[in-house]
Amino acid sequence: LDLTIGAFRERLDASDPAVRAYFIAKLMRQAKPDDVFSFVSVADIRRLWPGIVGHLGETRDFWTWLLDAWKDR
């Protein structure tokens, strides 16, 4: 699925939390961590985590570790 940045941002802002979680997970799988946070906040990720975590694939352990390390932020 090829998307423009604008279309991708629309999906990140979708009203359906399942759509948002899927596209945030896609971003987290494919982008560098610093780039992820130029699109979404840590608060967004934490809020949607239950819907995101199942889509993270091989990056799941990294993101779980990072969010745990930043739990007080």
Image (cartoon, rainbow, N blue to C red):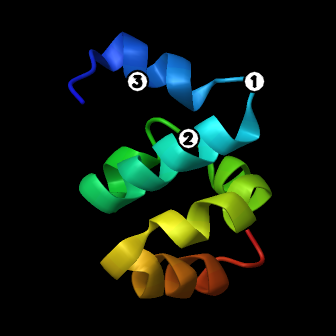
Query: In the picture provided, is 38 more to the left or to the right than 73?
Result: left
Q: Dividing the picture into quarters, in which one does residue 49 lie?
A: bottom right
Q: According to the image, label 1 marks what residue? A: 15
What is the x, y in percent for residue 33? 35, 60
Question: Does residue 18 appear in this view?
Answer: yes
Q: Which residue, given by chain and number where applicable, does mark 2 sit on?
A: 40
Residue 11 percent coordinates (x, y): 53, 25
Question: In the image, is 62 to the left or to the right of 47?
Answer: left
Q: Earlier in the sequence, mark 1 or mark 2?
A: 1
- Among numbered discs 3 and 1, the one appearing first in the sequence: 3
- Left or right: 32 with respect to 73? left
Whole-number angstrom distance, CA of label 3 to CA of label 1: 14 Å
Dot 3 amino acid type? Phe
4 up-or-down from 22: above or below: above
Q: Count the marks: how many?
A: 3
Q: Is residue 68 or residue 19 the one in the foreground?
A: 19
Q: Vertical placement of 27 versus 5: above or below? A: below
Q: Under tag 2, what secondary structure? A: loop
Q: Earlier in the sequence, mark 2 or mark 3?
A: 3
Distance CA(mark 2)–CA(mark 3)? 12 Å
- Mark 2 nearby-residue class (10 Å; few <14, some 14–19, many ≥20): some
